[in-house]
Amino acid sequence: MDDGVYPAKEVVVRPYAIDKTAVTNLEFEIFVKEKKWTTGAEKNGWSYVLDSLLPTANPSYLVDPHDSHWVAVPGAYWRNPLGLNSTITNLMSHPVVHVNYKDAAAYCKWRGLRLPGDREYE
């Protein structure tokens, strides 16, 4: 991936370790309880949800002006991924969603890890 850099630029990346799987709801829940962490989506009171995941369309929801498939859903955050009437009860082994960079970085720090840099991620 070149992120629009032309011509493509070759870079050297030092060896690094990365988890084989995404952080699950169960793992994130343990972090939240131990650190008493509140995510950005919780503080905002909403988060974007892919419209095809929502059970019904709601014309009162705001739509991302840059990508109409993403809908701002009140009450959506990691514990209620589709909004107020949803739950992660049967999704504890699924990847956590609705976390921002600050949330992810805090989780990594708690685990003694770090997020990958741009070059490592690409």
Image (cartoon, rainbow, N blue to C red):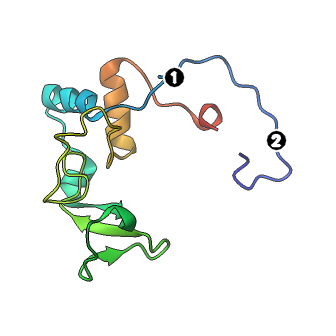
Vertical comparison of 105 with 18: above or below:
below
Query: Hey, which quadrant is residue 29 in on the image?
Result: top left
Quarter that holds the N terminus: top right
Vertical comparison of 79 with 111: above or below:
below
Position of residue 112 in the picture relative to residue 43 (left or right): right
Q: Amino acid at mark 2?
A: Lys
Counting residues from the start of the chain, the first of labels 2 and 1 encountered is 2
Per the rendering, the mark at residue 34 is none
Q: Which residue is mark 2?
A: 9
Q: Identify the residue at horizontal 83%, vertical 53% (top origin).
A: 6
Residue 40 lies, in percent from the top left, at 26, 50
Per the rendering, the mark at residue 18 is 1
How far apart are labels 2 and 1 at the CA level? 23 Å
For the residue carrying disc 2, how many other residues have a C-alpha within 10 Å: few (<14), some (14-19), or many (20+)?
few
Q: Nearer the viewer, residue 67 or 36?
A: 67
Residue 5 lies, in percent from the top left, at 77, 52
Q: Amino acid at mark 1?
A: Ile
Q: Nearer the viewer, residue 56 or 9?
A: 56
Residue 14 lies, in percent from the top left, at 67, 19
Which-is-in-front pick, marks 2 and 1? 1
Q: How many marks?
A: 2
Q: Identify the residue at horizontal 74%, vertical 56% (top origin).
A: 4
Query: Hey, which quadrant is residue 107 in on the image?
Result: top left
Quarter that holds the C terminus: top right
Task: Assign a secondary structure to mark 2.
Answer: loop
